Amino acid sequence: MRRITFLSGIIMMFVLTLSSSTFYMGKNKLQHIVLIQFKDSTTLDQLAEIEAAAMTLKGIKGVNDLKMSENVSPENLNQGYTHSLTMWFERETDRDEVYLPHSVHKAFVDLFVPQTEKVLVFDYWE
């Protein structure tokens, strides 16, 4: 009987540990989403240059799964935002202390921002 109680206790601890680690594992991606409305005067060549520069952000330590995409939703609810730039970080410090102040990011911002009408940045834990 003691053996069953002991084994039950170990199984219960294992289940609790597994469920709590699964809970926290679900919160390990800091999603960084940038919605972009380019100026009407932005040319296709400028847009291609911006997209190429966006890909250089992949070289910054901590940046994961970077994508730049064009809106394809048929719902017409994009409020003028036509493109998105998405990536994720494992830690806030990767975003705050590595990515944001990085010289590659600053160069991208200097190229990118003058061609935008509106930019919306939204970050959340997934």
Image (tube, grey):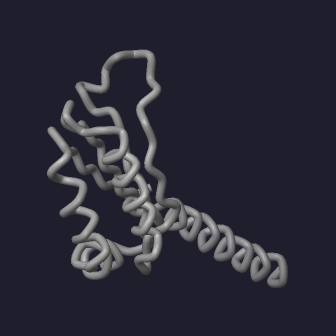
- The residue that appears at 30% across and 49% down in the rendered structure is 34
Does residue 126 sit above or below 18 in this rendering?
Answer: above
Could you say which quadrant of the image residue 78 lies in? top left
Along the line of sight, which residue is nearer the eye, 51 or 63? 51
Q: Going by the image, does 51 lie left or right of 5?
A: left
Residue lying at the far top of the rendered structure: 75
- The residue that appears at 40% across and 48% down in the rendered structure is 48
Q: Going by the image, does 47 lie left or right of 38?
A: right
Q: Position of residue 38 (x, y in %)?
A: 24, 38
Along the line of sight, which residue is nearer the eye, 21 or 50? 50
Q: Going by the image, does 93 lie left or right of 2?
A: left
If the image is split into quadrants, where does the C terminus sit?
A: bottom left
Number of callouts: 0
Could you say which quadrant of the image residue 35 lies in? top left
- The residue that appears at 84% across and 83% down in the rendered structure is 3
If the image is split into quadrants, where does the N terminus sit?
A: bottom right
Does residue 31 sit above or below 41 in this rendering?
Answer: below
Along the line of sight, which residue is nearer the eye, 11 or 125? 125
Q: Position of residue 2 (x, y in %)?
A: 80, 83
Could you say which quadrant of the image residue 74 lies in? top left
- The residue that appears at 34% across and 17% down in the rendered structure is 76
Q: Position of residue 104 (x, y in %)?
A: 31, 75
